[in-house]
């Protein structure tokens, strides 16, 4: 098995767990009679931990030069901490176990992203073809879990999640370390971070992930409340990820025709449309199908374009820290803000207004890209 297949397998298992946890764990918490505020807090813990944890793991990886060992250790610890959810249904108990889970879980993805980019030095166009296996894993999990939960108790979610985490640990054991890149000083990293285009890209990413906060916390609850079965919920999540896979496959062709700036602007504009449709047209299944297809732009194209920019603007020796910084800013600050804001608004303002606020966040991101990412930023292809 070559490194590309090992990386593809890791992405598959990692995002298969995400495909079980992200759409359905809020339903498990709801079954425990928790309030929307407490659900939002527990579902936003991952983003809260990502405020600082990826920076620690990125620093450790750059100094130790052992990305794979850290990935193996962190995924093993995540598996052990997730096991605690079998022992408690109390809010504080779940808060503790999920905090430990996300501290270790936050280590692996930025390091594997950097490992993948290092592996693809001579074939950058293959990034999407490796990363799409994460989307396949997500589809596998979200579809299967939705079908199972229509006929079996919600507690099955915990056992499936544990099994998928175990698969992530096994796949991590098969990864191989990349050839170390050149060592760069911290001052050179600060110089790159001080560039306006980098700052605007990171802050725009923060607003994009914040806009998705309500989707990740309350989308499944929103659909079930309007009479959709869990199988349909799984199908809608799957449709979004299928659109994401198509974008990953088409990105090399798209990049030949569209600049980084214009692609990002399109992603944010479509995010505004998507969240308005989900909020105000939830009773129309055809509209929901269309809105989920837009996930290919609001996540897929935005993610590839951002990875391409980070890979181009930061040198090889800075990639682990660049990925960690992006994870802390976008998924840490942005994800936490979006999730908690959704929790605060969901019951008081209602789902439609909450999704409208998400659309507003995406609009702010659009303005940031318009103002701060120049037309000279190049094409969205990983170098």
Image: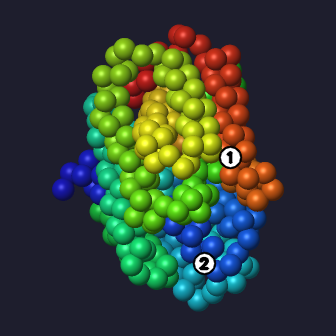
The answer to whether any part of residue 15 appears in the image is: no
Residue at x-position 53% and y-position 76%: 82
Query: Which numbered tag is attached to residue 31?
Result: 2
Q: Quadrant of the C terminus?
A: top left
Residue positioned most to the bottom: 87
* Secondary element type, mark 2: helix
Q: Circle 1 is placed at which residue position?
A: 352
Considering only vertical position in the picture, is 141 above or below 334? below
In x, y percent, where is residue 260? 49, 20
In x, y percent, where is residue 97? 63, 77
Considering only vertical position in the picture, is 212 above or below 218? above
**Location of residue 248 by image quarter:** top left
Residue at x-position 64% and y-position 80%: 32
Query: Which numbered tag is attached to residue 46?
Result: none
In x, y percent, where is residue 219? 57, 55
3 or 29, which lies in front? 29
185 or 113, which lies in front? 113
């Amino acid at each position: 098995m070559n490194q590309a297949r090992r990386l593809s397998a890791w992405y598959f298992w990692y995002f298969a767990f995400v495909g079980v946890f992200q759409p359905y764990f809020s339903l498990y918490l709801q079954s425990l009679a928790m309030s929307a505020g407490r659900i939002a807090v527990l579902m936003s813990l991952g983003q809260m931990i990502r405020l600082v944890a990826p920076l620690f793991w990125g620093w450790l990886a750059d100094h130790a030069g052992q990305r794979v060992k850290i990935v193996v250790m962190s995924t093993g610890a995540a598996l052990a901490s997730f096991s605690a959810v079998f022992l408690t249904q109390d809010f504080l108990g779940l808060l503790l176990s999920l905090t430990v889970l996300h501290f270790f879980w936050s280590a692996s993805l930025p390091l594997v992203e950097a490992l993948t980019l290092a592996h693809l030095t001579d074939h950058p166009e293959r990034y999407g073809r490796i990363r799409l296996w994460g989307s396949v894993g997500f589809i596998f999990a979200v579809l299967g879990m939705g079908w199972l939960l229509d006929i079996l108790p919600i507690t099955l979610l915990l056992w499936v999640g544990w099994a998928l985490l175990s698969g992530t640990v096994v796949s991590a054991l098969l990864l191989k370390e990349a050839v170390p890149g050149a060592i760069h000083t911290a001052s050179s990293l600060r110089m790159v971070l001080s560039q306006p285009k980098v700052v605007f890209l990171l802050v725009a990413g923060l607003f994009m992930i914040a806009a998705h906060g309500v989707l990740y916390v309350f989308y499944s609850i929103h659909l079930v409340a309007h009479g959709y079965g869990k199988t349909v919920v799984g199908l809608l999540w799957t449709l979004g990820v299928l659109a994401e896979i198509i974008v990953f496959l088409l990105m090399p062709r798209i990049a030949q025709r569209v600049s980084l700036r214009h692609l990002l602007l399109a992603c944010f504009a479509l995010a505004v449309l998507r969240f308005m449709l989900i909020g105000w047209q939830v009773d129309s299944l055809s509209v929901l199908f269309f809105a989920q297809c837009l996930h290919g732009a609001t996540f897929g194209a935005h993610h590839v374009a951002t990875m391409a920019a980070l890979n181009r603007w930061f040198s090889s020796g800075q990639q682990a820290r660049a990925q960690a910084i992006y994870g802390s800013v976008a998924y840490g600050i942005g994800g936490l803000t979006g999730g908690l804001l959704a929790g605060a608004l969901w019951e008081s303002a209602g789902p439609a207004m909450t999704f409208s606020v998400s659309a507003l966040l995406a609009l702010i991101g659009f303005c940031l890209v318009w103002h701060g990412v120049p037309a000279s930023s190049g094409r969205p292809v990983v170098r």
